[in-house]
Amino acid sequence: MQKIKLCVPLAALGGLMYLQSAPPEVRSGAWTTSGAMTEARTGASAVRLADGRVLITGGIGANGVIETAELYGATGSFSRVAPMLHSRSEHVSVALEDGRVLVAGGRTRGDAALSSAEIYDPAADAWKDVGVMNVSRVGHTATRLADGRVLIAGGEAGGATHASVETLDSGSNRFEYVSSQLSSARTRHGAGSCPGAAPYFRGGRL
């Protein structure tokens, strides 16, 4: 059995993956079937919590954009948790330093782009609104910085692709523009960071 360390972002969930609460182990490159989610969804977002469980939010279900959320545990099963305050798909989610999760942007019913953001507290199984981004975003990225702030970059809305970047301070719940923008406007790109290094962005489309 080969153990490896990776520095890659967890992408939006488009299907089922087998995830463990312990660091991932590569077993000859094979996939293992997990249980089924509580409902079918596409355009959802997934993020790993501090305790190893995975929070899956939103997406498009059988009747359109949904606000439901569920947790995937180490036993390989999914369970419902409190729904988000707003239905959304193609949004981002990122774990905060204190164990809570930020969810921001995406599309809602009627194909409208969202600027709203909310935070999930796993301990209380509760959501709270945390204001709005400076611009509506779909296909953007969210990366937690070393100082605990969240960097939100790019995306699109209303037919325009963004190069703008903003941060959220989860202590004050304030979104603020960053003075420097991306080198080019991009959406549906990737982002990530490694310890001691600046965030990076890759791919996407104009």
Image: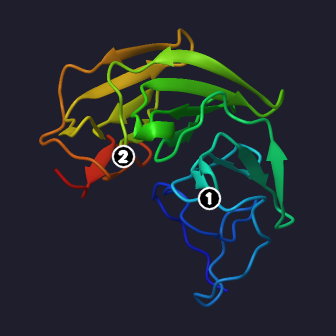
Q: Is residue 158 above or below residue 203?
A: above
Q: Is residue 130 above or below residue 109?
A: above
Q: Name the colouring of the figure.
A: rainbow
Residue 205 horizontal/vertical position (percent): 21, 55
Residue type at tag 2: Gly
Quadrant position of residue 39: bottom right
Q: Write the residue at 47% across / 54% down.
A: 9
Q: Which residue is mark 2?
A: 139
Q: Write the residue at 22% across / 35% down.
A: 162
Residue type at tag 1: Arg
On residue 41, the disc is 1
On residue 95, the disc is none
The alpha-carbon separation of the residues under discs 1 and 2 comes to 17 Å
From where the camera sits, is residue 148 visible?
Answer: no
Q: How many neighbours does mark 1 have within 10 angstroms: few (below 14), some (14-19), or many (20 or more)?
A: many
SS category of the residue bearing label 1: loop
Residue 80 horizontal/vertical position (percent): 82, 48
Pointer 1 or 2: first along the chain: 1
- In the image shown, does 35 or 20 lie closer to the viewer? 35
Instruction: Give the quadrant of the N terminus.
Output: bottom right
